[in-house]
Image (cartoon, rainbow, N blue to C red):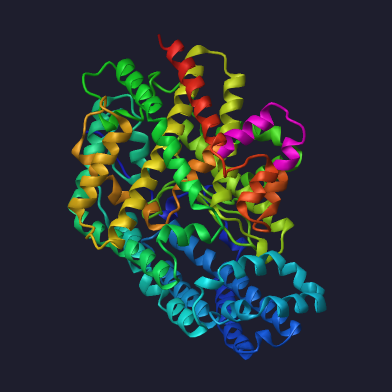
Amino acid sequence: MTDVKTLPTRTEVPEKLTWNLELIYPTEQDWETDFQQVKQLATQIQTFKNKIGDSAAQLLQALDQAHAIFRKLEKTYVYASMKSDQDTNNNHFQGLNSRVSSLVANVSADLAFVEPEVIAISDEKLAQFTAAEPKLQDYSHYLESLRLTKDHVLSAESEALLNGAEEVFESSSLTFGVLTNSDLEFPYVEDENGQTVQLSNGLYGALIESTDRDVREDAFKALYSVYDQFQNTLAQTLSGETKRHNFLAKVHHYPSARAAAMAKDNIPEQVYDTLTKQVDQHLPLLHRYVNLRKKILGVDELHMYDMYVPLTGEPPLNFTFDEAKAEAKKALAILGDDYLSHVEEIFDNRYIDVVENKGKRSGAYSGGAYDTAPYELLNWQDSVNSLYTLVHETGHSVHSWYTRHNQPYQYGEYPIFLAEIASTTNENLLTEYLLKTQTDPKVRAYILNYYLDGFKGTVYRQTQFSEFEHFIHTADAEGQPLTAESLSDHYGRLNARYYGPAVAEDPEIALEWSRIPHFYYNYYVYQYATGFAAASSLSQLITTDQPNAIEHYLDYLKSGSSDYAIEIMKKAGVDMTQPNYLEAAFNVFETRLNELESLLK
């Protein structure tokens, strides 16, 4: 009999491997105090209703108070949500999260009158206000961005009604999260050591990279056997979320959900279309890589569960968490001492929740609020992949630190379009560092293989996801029902087109749509692909010592949302309105594919 390995409970995880949320609120009573204060402030701001446009002073005070409310609300929200994420089986923290989610909806409804009243101020009157009150200059870009939405903002009463219904709108996404993170029971499988382990979303990522093909196949089929049982429920939650996006876009007078989602950050829709077109034109490169994978693995049929195992056999590089932190600092040192000091702050002060435990939210993210540390959630495995995840999330976290310490609250966040560039630049710098320092052909081949897999998973796979996301929104807008059958049929055909004829059409992969949380994020995933390509350009500027490259890069990290994302990136050295940055990224992919093919001959 072999020992059965199960996940630890939250209380069994060593404290040093957990994040310290007491830095946000020393006690839950402190959280409760802020919670109640937000409710009170949201009531008090009603005195500005129908008066914001009366004077420059009224406008400034209303904006200041509205942002102060959201600032405190954000802090209470991230504390409750992170407490919930660390153990989704904990009913008490689920309750806190539910309470603050209700508060977000109520406050959004209470403050829904603010932006419509600001937008209603005429251009001439606003210019007079700005001249009379210099402090309004602090809101100049905010006001400009807001007025771009003039044709898409409803009356204060209508916006309040929609914001008040936010909890209802979120039900599909919340149901998906609870079901997949907490309620789904995955079977036991054997790992490559013959040890019986309970499958989880986090462990699946490690098993699918196993050099033992039976382990990969068993994990793949076991995972999808569970999602297969719930495919109709998951089709319903995804359909509900899609309807939410389409409904909100329609009532706000946008031609589509995609137009609405991209207008929020003033990103031209051509950026999305250019990405899809460029990836489609470069699918032969992916097919070439897939054929190499089939050849090196020496299999008669290449399956989707063969797509993540290293082509070089057993990984020559593995890292404990402490080893990974040391390696990450070496790779990121090129960005300078100031950048590195913030990396060390994150690593050394329990800002990171490291290991997987029962009920913990799957995946990884960088979180926090304007007035908190930049926290990170991980589900650590001793692997190169976890090293890259650490570097990726730390890219987000340092970006957050620079933004929050260089911008006022109204510009203290950055759009996702910019966020993925910072995190993926870190990944590219890590790859450059490893290729520069590792001379062993086996290690070098592994790193190249890892890079190509990362490119495949980020540029190709996320664009595949983007195509599917656009399909479900378009289908729903045209009145087509999103059933499990129709979703799986389309996804299966899309997957086959992307990976080409060298890959067997496994029926299980057609269900992949059912387990992807990003499909609930409203045209989010394309930014992973554009971000990776832009990061490739930035990392090349940095590693080749281009004049002022690091200075311009740090300026981008400090910019927050003080300008439009496209303009911030132009200042950093990348024009994302043109296809050049994508073409350059595919050139890097091809160059590294050439080298890997040579090494593996």
Q: Is residue 240 left or right of residue 134?
A: left
Q: Point out residue 389 in the picture as x, y percentages from the top left corner.
A: 50, 40
Q: What residue occupies the far front of the structure in this picture? A: 124
- Quadrant containing the C terminus is top left
Q: Point out residue 561 in the picture as x, y percentages from the top left corner.
A: 64, 58
Q: Nearer the viewer, residue 467 or 292?
A: 467
Occupied quadrant, residue 534? top right
Name the residue located 50 percent from the left edge and 47 percent from the top edge: 271
Q: What residue occupies the far top of the structure in this picture? A: 601
Q: Is residue 271 within the magenta segment?
A: no
Q: Nearer the viewer, residue 215 or 307?
A: 307
Name the residue located 68 percent from the left edge and 42 percent from the top edge: 572
Q: Residue 322, can we see it? A: no
Q: Is residue 286 left or right of residue 535?
A: left
Query: In the image, is residue 144 above or below residue 531?
Result: below
* Most common SS among magenta residues: helix
Q: Residue 69, can we see it? A: yes
Q: Point out residue 540 in the picture as x, y percentages from the top left corner.
A: 63, 30
Q: Nearer the viewer, residue 24 or 40?
A: 40
- Quadrant containing the N terminus is top left
Q: Point out residue 530 in the picture as x, y percentages from the top left corner.
A: 51, 42
Query: In the image, is residue 194 above or below residue 75?
Result: above
What's drawn in magenta, residue-wise? 534-553
How many callouts does the rendering have? 0
Q: Nearer the viewer, residue 572 or 300?
A: 572
Occupied quadrant, residue 303? top left
Query: In the image, is residue 205 above or below residue 523?
Result: above
